[in-house]
Amino acid sequence: MPTYVYRCDDVCDDFTQRHPMADIPDAASCPGCGRDARRVIGAPALGAGESSAMRLHDATRSTADSPAVVTNVPGRRRKTTPVSSNPLHRKLPRP
Ligand SMILES: [Zn+2]
């Protein structure tokens, strides 16, 4: 549900309420004085880009657009030294 800003005509501060888009009241009761407060048309919530969910979304999108180049499978390392020095062990079947 989106958040809507309401402004009281008295000296009260603006306040926000969440309503479904299909049922947006033009006025809401002010929590400070109890009078009706008008809905204010404001800027879209561009600051949501600072949230961790938006950072994750941006990172996921950038990965899809330009994936990182890797040289091996992450989490697996090549073993540089053989486990056994017996040459016959190299002929055994591998899993
Ligand atoms: Zn008020």
Image: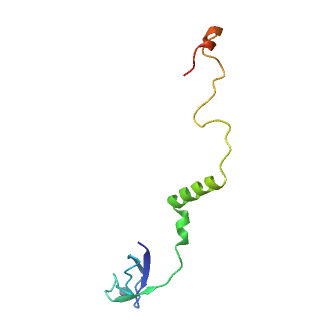
66 sits to left or right of 34: right
Residue 77, quarter of picture: top right
Between residues 38 and 92, which one lies in front from this camera angle?
A: 92
- Can residue 48 be seen by looking at this rendering? yes
Between residues 14 and 50, which one lies in front from this camera angle?
A: 50
Residue 39, quarter of picture: bottom left
56 sits to left or right of 37: right
Spot occupied by residue 89 in the image (x, y as percentages of width and height): 60, 11
Instruction: Name the residue at 43% across, 75% down.
Output: 3
Spot occupied by residue 46 in the image (x, y as percentages of width and height): 55, 71
Instruction: Name the residue at 54% across, 69% down.
Output: 47
Q: Quadrant of ligand 1?
A: bottom left
- Can residue 86 be seen by looking at this rendering? no
Q: Quadrant of the C terminus?
A: top right
Spot occupied by residue 21 in the image (x, y as percentages of width and height): 41, 77
Q: Residue furthest bottom?
A: 9
Q: Quadrant of the N terminus?
A: bottom left
Q: Is residue 13 above or below residue 84?
A: below
